[in-house]
Amino acid sequence: MKIAELIMRDAKDRGLTHFFGLPGGGAPLDLMEAGRVSGVQFVSVAHESSAALMAGYHGLMKSTAGLALAVKGVGAGNLVGGATNAHFERLPVVCLCECSPASFRQKDLVQHCDHTGMFGSVVKSHATLSPEAAPLQIGSAVEKATSGRPGPVLLNLPSDLGQAECASSIPRGTPQPAAPPSREAIDAFRKRLQSARKPAVIAGADALRGKALAELRTFVDNIEAAVLVTMEARGVFPESHARWAGVLVGTFGPNIIESKVLEEADLVVLVGVDAMMSHAPWKSTLPVIELSADGRYESLARTPALRVDGDLRSGLAALAAHRQPGFSIGSIKSMRDSILRQFARPPHAKLATQDVLELIRGALPREGALITETGAFVTMVERLWPVEEPGAYYGTSGGRTMGLMLPAILGAKLAMPDRPMIGLGADGSLLMRLGELEVFARTGVNVPLLIINDRALGTMKSRQKSRGFPDYALDLAEVDFAQIARACGLNGVAVHTPEELRRALVEAIAADRTTLIDVRVDRAAYQDSFGPTIGVLS
């Protein structure tokens, strides 16, 4: 079997239906043809960084690693940007890059550079394929991209080896479950927990990866904790639950929910928390105890008073019989309500983000998914959009990534075409990905895309104003995004009121193609609302 054929047969066997990238001569053409024959369709994109994100979300929906393709040199360089996003968003993707043949010794050649050096700080592993080792290398790349905390990996394919013969069987390792914590460690954890009067639990996405959600909920109920979840962990704890307080963003500033909770608590319990999901180093002086899925993971608290490493499900199950009093339901509600007042709809706005979220909520069925990105609305989504279960919401976390939504929802929708989805993005982010609108038309992906348009980089304008700087350099030219969408073969409509948006959403859901809805929010109200949502009240 040829290397290109093995790669694409493996992709098919793992459930992938598409792979993404920009082609070139040589090995990329071999891969495209092998994909066509195998039934894994190649999707040519406008920019390689989009390919990494499309592949990452495609893989995420398929519970495997997606596949992104780039040519050597500049193509690989473009793909690094998407791999960086995938690193910060914890997305499983194999970055497959054509590279120069091993026989090339000259340093300065067209499109010849050190891919490993470019990708090195953001990939979990890297390898250059060879005929002798290709099956093992391919299997290892997928395993590393998906194991533990997912992320990008790099596979270089020399341009002269796409048609090289290799073995046809990819060895698969059996995932080894983490060892359960020792009884002594759990006893010490329980003893330290008993000393608390008001424990706060911070839950991370490792609880989902460890299949420990039921055990987490039992643990929280039994110790009467107030619960924060990290940015990537929406849905690991049902957000309609009376003990859910909010989303931890890790700024630790005043007037935000995490600070309210930490002011009231006398102990913090970390459960499966990824240290990347914090904007700043840990600042609380509270004692911290931690259940971690892997002893190699860095702790959010840097030096917890007690840390127990091992299988999270086993650890939480071992604590299932432990009960103690903690936060009252009323006190958690009071903290939550005090913060939500900062998220009130601007009273004089003609169209506000709060309207957008309310209308999406009414239009999206329970089995649907909202996919978003960063923007001045991001903290509103984290406070005003309750998530009941994992997979109902996909937003930016460790990357706070601009330009995320468009490639994310395209990759996700190609993986799950029958699942209802709505994309929510912003004008500055859309400008980064305009070329990908053509891909929606070409692939036939049909999904409503809502673009909050304040004709500015609204988040930065708000920060600029809060620091007392003059209004400078952050306004955008007025762009007719609806017309651009129509020029690409999509539906496009601009809306200025909640009623116009409601009608546009109904029509978009019933449409036979993607509809871009250009949501013209009130600029000043939108930008001024950002400060209070991050705790800046003056």
Image (cartoon, rainbow, N blue to C red):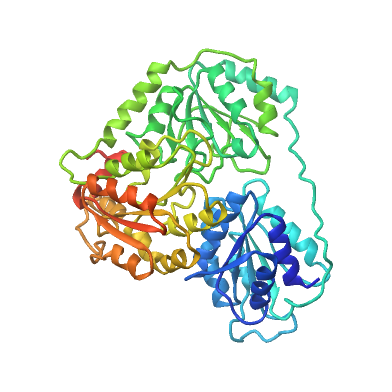
* Residue 293 on image: x %, y %: 66, 37
Screen quadrant of the N terminus:
bottom right
Q: Is residue 107 above or below residue 511?
A: below
Residue 151, relative to residue 188: is it above or below?
Answer: below
x and y, in percent, of residue 474 in the image: 26, 61
| Position of residue 93 in the picture relative to residue 338 (left or right) | right
Viewer-nearest residue: 285 or 213: 213
**Res 424 seen here:** no
In this rendered view, identify the residue nearer to me: 30 or 288.
30
Q: Look at 27% across and 35% down and name the residue there.
A: 342
Residue 505 percent across, percent down from the top left: 33, 49
Rendered-image quadrant of the C terminus: top left
Residue 170 position by quadrant: bottom right
> Which residue is drawn at the image coordinates 82% and 71% (left, top)?
166
* Residue pictured at 60% horizontal, 27% vertical: 214
Left or right placement of residue 88 versus residue 249 in this view: right
In the rendering, at what x and y percent does residue 5 appear? Answer: 74, 69
Q: Quadrant of the rendered structure where residue 384 is?
A: top left
* Horizontal arrangement in the rendering, residue 511 relative to residue 129 (left or right): left
